[in-house]
Image: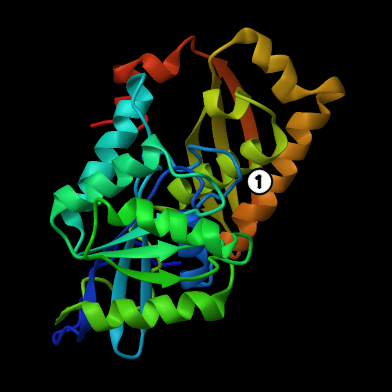
Amino acid sequence: MSTQVPVSSEVPEKGKTGFVALLGRPNTGKSTLLNTLLGCHLAAVSNKPQTTRKRMLGIYNDADSQILFLDAPGVHCAKIAIDEAMAQSVDRVLEDADLVICLLDPTREPGEEDHMAAELAGLCGKPTLLVLNKTDLATPVQQEASLAFYREILPGAESISLIATDSGSAGHLLQRIKELLPEGLFLFDRENLTDAYERDVAAELIREVLLEELQQEIPHSIAVVINFWKVAGDRIRIDATLTLEREAHKGIVIGQEGRMIKKIKRRSMQKISEFCGQKVELDLFLKILPNWRKQKNFLKEINLME
């Protein structure tokens, strides 16, 4: 898979293009929508908040457009350093955006995080679409209440309803995005799916498995770092470190007779292999670093904070 390769042809391609920010409170379906639009499992997805920790670029290409989707962390109140890092990531995404997709979840009553997301969309001064997700689950009353809440802050914003997991539904949004974006030169080769290295995507896929397999707060207190990545023949050899905050979590991650860590390893290998299109050998190592989420130096070291 090709990544981070700018267009190199003598005559760059042109068409509908621009950066589109995916904004919203945690668990509105931003990463799910990104994966559906790209037709590929690029962004980590789970039903737990704060799955997305940093900005992820997904590049959509078709015959006449190149749309650069920026998946931002969920908007929430900053309490510790890692929250501050995610808020910085949201700010950078909105700064780069030509268009903002504000994703709404009408199955939950609007609250402080929705208010923050709407204010950020309004303050950035970019055109904004209110995209009402989960319309297969929400009642008409819930949908109207969610839109009314956001329109208190974004009165002129156009709205579209969809189901983020449905490609046909997402296709209608895609068409509207194309209509709103300007003509311009494409920034990436058509082969490119993201500007992230494969090893960074792999780290996010391992985090996705941790979120799926571990309960409560534990997966949120784990950082995943790829230490070694080597392509040898038809397979990729990977070493990754899982940094935990508490010694007590180590036994839970390993599991009885090592069953949990083996399951995490097996499922991670499967996800990474599907993404990269190659066989994968993965070794996982555990490290304890108390309160790493509050340590700005460590967050900078693992590229979660500038």
Depth check, front residue: 176 or 192: 176
Depth check, front residue: 122 or 303: 122
Query: Residue placed at 45% from the left, 55% from the top?
Result: 145
Q: Viewed as shown, does residue 23 lie left or right of 273? A: left
Residue 41 seen by the camera: no
Instruction: Tell me the element at label 1.
Output: helix
Q: Viewed as shown, does residue 125 lie left or right of 191? A: left
Q: Amino acid at mark 1?
A: Ser
Going by the picture, which residue comes out furthest to the front?
141
Where's residue 23, x and y in %?
A: 34, 52
Indicate whether 210 appears above or below 46: above
Residue 89 seen by the camera: yes
Where's residue 294, x and y in %?
A: 38, 15
Depth check, front residue: 245 or 236: 245
Indicate whether 18 appears above or below 21: below
Query: Residue placed at 16% from the left, 60% from the top?
Result: 126
Q: Viewed as shown, does residue 271 lie left or right of 38? A: right
Q: Quadrant of residue 7?
A: bottom left
Q: State how the image is colored.
A: rainbow
Query: Residue placed at 36% from the left, 51% from the top?
Result: 149
Query: Residue placed at 54% from the left, 81% from the top?
Result: 168
Where's residue 158, x and y in %?
A: 29, 70
Picture mark count: 1
Disc 1 designates what residue?
Answer: 268
Depth check, front residue: 71 or 2: 71
Q: Quadrant of the C terminus?
A: top left
